[in-house]
């Protein structure tokens, strides 16, 4: 349950702390006193988006803190554990909004992201704002409400997951077929490019090898002349390096025989003599292998010219052309494999369609069963809410389509995001009138009562711990208002309820009555909230009856309403 709400420096609120009753807490106050500000603070601490404009003028930040008892940790505990937040007997949500616009969120004094605060808030509180009853007028919201009543969210989520997989397969097939069509349109050009590059026989690193071989062939005569001359200088001439070194080695051998200090020099000179011999042998082998092949040179130059033309034509290096050739080859091969891939995808699509259809049919059957129960539940509550002849119907329709994605009993239907049923709530509030869509039939007061009936039904089916109604009494008065008040009172025996109202019939049902007022302190307007004692309650309900001029008759009537409320 919501135990307390602490608010500081938020809008017109300087600082206040409000405690709530476990059953029915009613909030009243003059128009503009700040009731909506209080609900806005609760909304923010439950994860709604914040604005710096909400920070009280002159304050550094606004702080809102809500304390809950932890009776419903079965859904919240896993969220906290995953985020590394300690689960304690009390759950404290806190929101801080800086004047500069920054917002900080905390759960049990541990910083957390806004998304987690919002998740936890949705598990704790179902807040019905002044505009929320309009959701009933939009049929696209009805399937979710029906699923909530029938506790079918798991099956609905399963359907949506299968639908997503099915649509992904369909998109993959469409992309594959588009790729095949594109390849067919480009096949001649791609084939021409590939054959040209394939015929060129491109080899990685070929350009450098060509350049090197051409250089050798162009300089063959020079290489032969220089190599031959080198052989003569090293070995063949009378005064060659080898002859001079041999004589020097002979002299060093004689010197070393007398003085061993010449031995290192002798070893070095013998090494030099061996190097000369090796250099002479290499020069001999090299010159004997030199090729004077003009035909080969011309062939290499033509090859080099071909590579240069290809590179210039395509605006790419030879290495890049090799990559292009391989990609073109893959594209040409891909066209050949498209048929097989498409057949495989079609098989997967049919299998996915079968699973999707089975889940859609199961979900539809569950919805039809839940619809019957919801119709009975809503009609029963409407009777208590002074709509004795009310008829409420849940209409489930399907849309056949030749290319529909759901197959059932030999027919095909369109697959919608939440099933293959269109769900719409229908109502008749007058005897003899056939049910019609809510938007075309119900008045504002009737919509409020239908929403309360829906909330009552959902609260019994789902485990909504706390229900907050911000002016659920729109458009009703008199007997209908008293019926709504009694319904809220009875519902509060199952779930904690906080309700803002302008009607004395509803205010009189309070287990705890809070009054919101506005006053001026030091040239600043301040909103305050105070719990009312018995006499104060009578006075406040009397004010709701007769306005500012409270008469003895209104006080007497207020006392009677409160006494009646206490007996419910």
Image: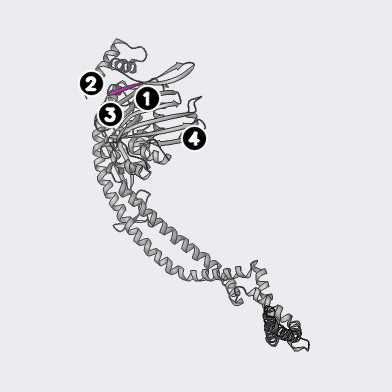
Sequence order check: which comes first, mark 1 or mark 2?
1
- In reply to whether residue 511 is colored magenta, the answer given is yes
Image coordinates of residue 345 in percent, x first then y, are 40, 64
Circle 1 is placed at which residue position?
17
Q: Are marks 1 and 4 in contact (CB under 8 Å)?
A: no
Front residue (pair 423, 10): 10
Q: Secondary structure at mark 4?
A: loop
Q: Position of residue 220 (x, y in %)?
A: 73, 83
Mark 4 neighbour class, 10 Å CA radius: few under 14, some 14 to 19, many 20 or more = few
Question: Which residue lies under the disc numbered 4?
Answer: 102
Q: Earlier in the sequence, mark 4 or mark 3?
A: 3
Q: Quadrant of residue 320?
A: bottom right
Q: How far separated are the C-alphas under marks 1 and 2?
A: 30 Å
How far apart, in angstroms, are the residues tagged by discs 3 and 1? 16 Å
Asked if residue 213 lies left or right of residue 478, the reply is right
| Foreground residue among 172 and 401 | 172
User: Which is nearer the eye, 244 or 213?
Assistant: 244
**What is the secondary structure assignment of the residue under circle 2?**
helix
> Does 5 sit above or below residue 395?
above
Residue 84 occupies quadrant: top left
Give the farthest residue toward the top. 552
Counting residues from the start of the chain, the first of labels 4 and 2 encountered is 4
Confirm or deny contact between disc 1 and disc 2 (CB under 8 A). Answer: no
């Amino acid at each position: 349950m919501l135990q307390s709400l602490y608010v500081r420096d938020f809008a017109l609120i300087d600082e206040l702390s409000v405690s709530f009753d476990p059953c029915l807490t009613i909030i009243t106050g003059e128009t503009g006193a700040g009731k909506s500000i209080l609900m806005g603070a609760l909304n923010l601490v439950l994860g709604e988006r914040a604005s710096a404009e909400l920070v009280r003028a002159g304050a550094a930040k606004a702080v809102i803190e809500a304390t809950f008892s932890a009776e419903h940790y079965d859904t919240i505990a896993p969220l906290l554990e995953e985020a590394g937040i300690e689960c304690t007997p009390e759950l404290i949500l806190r929101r801080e909004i800086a004047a500069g616009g920054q917002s900080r969120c905390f759960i049990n004094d541990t910083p957390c992201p806004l998304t987690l605060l919002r998740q936890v808030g949705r598990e704790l509180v179902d807040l019905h704002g002044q505009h929320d009853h309009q959701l009933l007028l939009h049929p696209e919201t009805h399937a979710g409400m029906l699923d909530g009543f029938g506790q079918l969210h798991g099956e609905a989520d399963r359907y949506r997951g299968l639908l997503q997989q099915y649509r992904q397969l369909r998109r993959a097939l469409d992309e594959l077929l588009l790729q095949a069509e594109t390849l067919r349109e480009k096949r001649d050009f791609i084939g021409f490019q590939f054959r040209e590059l394939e015929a060129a026989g491109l080899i990685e690193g070929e350009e450098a090898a060509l350049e090197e071989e051409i250089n050798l062939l162009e300089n063959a005569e020079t290489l032969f002349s220089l190599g031959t001359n080198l052989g003569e200088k090293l070995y063949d001439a009378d005064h060659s390096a080898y002859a001079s070194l041999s004589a020097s080695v002979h002299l060093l051998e004689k010197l070393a025989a007398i003085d061993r200090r010449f031995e290192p020099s002798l070893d070095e000179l013998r090494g030099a003599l061996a190097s000369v011999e090796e250099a002479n042998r290499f020069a001999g082998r090299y010159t004997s292998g030199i090729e004077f092949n003009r035909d080969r040179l011309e062939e290499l130059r033509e090859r080099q010219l071909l590579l240069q033309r290809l590179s210039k034509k395509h605006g790419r290096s030879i290495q890049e052309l090799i990559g292009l050739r391989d990609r073109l080859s893959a594209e040409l091969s891909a066209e050949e494999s498209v048929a097989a891939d498409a057949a495989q995808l079609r098989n997967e699509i049919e299998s996915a369609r079968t699973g999707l259809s089975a889940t859609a049919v199961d979900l539809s059957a569950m919805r039809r069963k839940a619809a019957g129960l919801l119709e009975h539940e809503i009609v029963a509550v409407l009777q208590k809410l002074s709509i004795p002849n009310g008829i409420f119907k849940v209409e489930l329709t399907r849309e056949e389509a030749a290319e529909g994605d759901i197959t059932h009993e030999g027919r095909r239907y369109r697959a919608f995001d939440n099933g293959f049923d269109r769900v719409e709530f229908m109502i008749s509030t007058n005897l003899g009138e056939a049910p019609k869509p809510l938007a075309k039939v119900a008045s504002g007061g009737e919509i409020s009562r239908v929403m309360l009936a829906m909330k009552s039904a959902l609260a019994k089916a789902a485990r909504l711990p706390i229900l907050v109604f911000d002016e659920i009494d729109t458009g009703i008065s008199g007997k209908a208002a008293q019926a709504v008040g009694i319904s809220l009172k009875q519902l509060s025996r199952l779930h904690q309820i906080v309700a803002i109202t302008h009607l004395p019939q509803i205010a009189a049902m309070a287990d705890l009555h809070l009054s919101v007022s506005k006053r001026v302190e030091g040239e600043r307007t301040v909103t305050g909230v105070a719990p009312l004692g018995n006499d104060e309650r009578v006075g406040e309900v009397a004010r709701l009856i007769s306005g500012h001029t409270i008469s003895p008759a209104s006080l007497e009537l207020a006392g009677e309403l409160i006494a009646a409320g206490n007996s419910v």
